[in-house]
Amino acid sequence: MLDVRRQKRKRLQVAGFFFQRIFLLQLFFSLVSSVFCLQSFAQYTFTGKVMDSVTFEPLPFVTILYNHSTDGTRTDMDGKFSFTSPSSFIHITISYVGYKTRDTDLTFSDSKTPIKILLQTEDQELEDVTILSGENPANRIIREAVKHSKENDPANLGAYSFSSYNKFLYTADASAAEKVKSGDTTRELMEYLKGNYLMIMESQIETIFKKPGLKKQFVIATKVSGLKDPNFSLDASQLQPFSFYDHFISLVEIDYLNPVSEGSSNLYFFNIDDTTYSGTDTIYHISFKPRKGKTFMSLKGTLFINSRSYAIQHVIAEPFDTAGLAMIVKVEQDYNKPDGIHWFPNQYNTNIHYNNFLKPGLKVFFQGRTYIDSVKINPDIHSNVFDGIGQQIESGAGTRDENYWNTVRPDLLTEKEQNTYHDMDSLGSARHLDTKLRIVTALMLSKFPIGPISIDISNIVKINAKENYRFGIGLMTNEKISKSFTLAGYGGYGLNDHVWKYGANLKLIFSEQYNSTLSFQYTHDYEESGGVDFYHNNFFGNTQKWRNTIINRFDLTDRYSISVTGRNFRFLNFEFSAFEAQKLPAFDYTYHSPQNHEPVSAPFIFTGIKLSCRYAYKEKVVKSFGQNFEAYDPFPVLWFNVTHGMKVLNGQFDYWKFDLKFYYDFPSKRFGETYLQGYAGYATSTLPVSELFSCKGNYTLFGLYSYSNFQTMRVNEFIYDQYAALFWEQDFGSLIFKKGKFRPKVLFSTSAAIGALHDPELHSSILFKQPEKPYTESGLVVNNIVSKKFLGAVRFGIGIGGYYRWGYFILPQWKDNLALKVAFYVSG
């Protein structure tokens, strides 16, 4: 039995050895075949960057072709490229408009260092070409792009959402450090900038959109070098348009005619510089610039049009004429198909440079990069999400830690960026930059915080013809006491009238997001007789305050009011109030009763309710620095008041009163910017002059220009109980004078008013004209006759203008119809 078992074991051993040999052979052939397969399908990845050989600036959208074929790739907006090849050796041809074509061989290396390819520029001017036969083929492609613009414009999608990472760097040209004498602060700054940036800003923003025009941004994270908890953010949409399909392209709030717009080939010259291929798609590289002799707000750059639906795949654009600009802007946009169907922005680049920033010779550069991902096309978004705030900063956005940022950054911070954060954060802590920023923010809002109390700067000095100068003070609680309420009071004394004015206000804040408040107010102060106030009408740069200095007809008013404010229907802000106003005219005036024509003793007491509204369709409101700012008004803005006076409590008058105002500005192809502003008012009953309309007279022979006022109409020259006024201004900018360094900006305007006053005999002891006919005037203002850059970032200009009164109310002496104005101009 033992031998039998041995024989069986031997046979099993032989069989096992045989099968082992077979397995080893199979393994051998498997390995051999695997090696051949790996060699057949090996993919070598080449990554690198294409840059300018002199400035080392990255070059976007450079064409890279493989092995003398039409297959290839392009660099992205940061000049980076990445492609795979089955061979470790490849020949590439690199071409780019304005640069010499370069051929080079690449050999794969295991090194992690990206390949750097430098291109040399070549002098190349694009000239207008006279087509002797046929049509410029670029014009046909542009027409097709215009024809398909609606279907390619992402703004026409039903809905979308995406996430964006934004990085903005401020730096300066440090190459001139050796040219600056030792000890100069500029040289010290330039030496510092060799290893640091001036500032870094980062943000992570979630954006949602739903047709028609409902858009909201949530700032999930924001980071600014030097600040511990920044309460503001910046994104590309504040510097350039979301897509390149609008009729006008706004670059940092200056409108330029889009080269991809109806009839643009009559104004722009287009040229096909190159043609590349991506699969079955042809990509046309079309440069553009304004035609010779054509005067309009124009751009220059390059369009990359994809033959599939003639969509814009890439675009590079900058202003053609930069003379007179304090900052020079260049933008780039890249598009792809995240869902394989719809074109959508993929990346934005924004580059701005300032010459002579702060000091002569110091060039500062702003570099913005926005990367878009997590795009969803036509997601289900509920309309209730859109509450009227276009951008809001989420709680904790300014205090995200470094672990969070490393998850959202496309690339790790460079050593230079890390140095900047380290040095600026140390400097910010040492110099309390967060505190100083809060103070600057408060000053912008005319408030100076001192601990839990803020000083209302607007109440320190007031100027008008009645008081001459008023000196006073205003105090209010701030967020250090409570964010749920403010208690404010003010007092002031007029040097000419020797009268004290004062007031107090308690405001309960229920929701900042919805502007929901309840206020109790009392004032003993002057109010313009016949003046009109609109809700939410104060903004930076409002020249109406200059008119206030010449007003001389006031009512000393004791006003008691309770008001509720809020925001509804997303774009409607309102205030509803109940009031009693006791108005004592501070001038000689007698009002006669309509019933018996007997004089009515003052003060006149008005008791009633009032609804004031402001409606701005699709307005973008940005919540920044703890405040809401109206940042963008694409449509006309409408204000209206409805007042119902009643004979209740102490009220003496039963009446209805309606006030209306609108404002709209829009660009045109050839004539710059058009501004329209209109007013109208209607009172249903005969009232004292205090509650009628004095229109908007702003006459002084020599004075300050205040837009949307009648420059030649005397203050209180007319009294209306119903009227309408229209102000039209055409700002040609520098389109008329475009040569040389002298670039004055020309503005032409015409204004008209018409109205009526019923029962004028009820008003005595004052001089006024009956508005039986239309009032008309026209004027010309030449801005920037003298201009100067301030700190290299903003240009301030001074201009002069003249207005002339004509038509039915022309005065006998020509010089009495003339008003000369000084205008101030601020531009980027």
Image: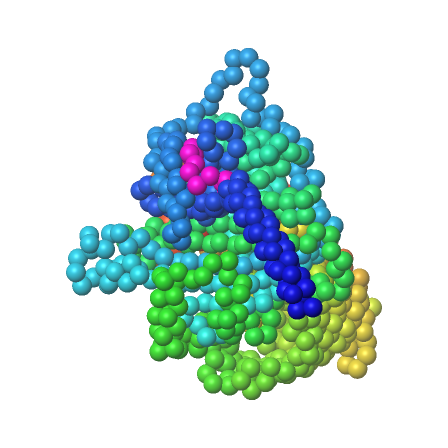
Can you name the residue that lies furthest to the left here? 182
| Residue 248 point in image, percent of width and height | 58, 42
Up/down of 359 relative to 812, above or below: below
Camera-nearest residue between 11 and 575: 11
Residue 366 in the magenta stretch? The answer is no
Query: Considering the image in quadrants, where does the N terminus appear?
Result: bottom right
Mostly what secondary structure, the magenta segment? strand
Q: Position of residue 467 (x, y in %)?
A: 50, 72
Residue at 64% x, 30% y: name it.
Answer: 144
Q: Is residue 283 above or below residue 810?
A: above
- The segment highlighted magenta reads 84-97
Between 79 and 479, the one lying in front of the other is 79
Residue 699 at what x, y percent from top left? 53, 54
Residue 630 shows in the view: no
Q: How is the image coloured?
A: rainbow
In the rendering, at what x and y percent does residue 11 appear? 64, 58
Q: Left or right: 98 with respect to 281? A: left
Q: Quadrant of residue 782?
A: top left
- Residue at 46%, 36% (x, y): give it: 64
Residue visible at 60% across and 50% down? Answer: 22
How many labels sit on residues?
0
| Residue 101 appears in view | yes
- Taking the spot 33% from the left edge, 55% from the top edge, the residue there is 172
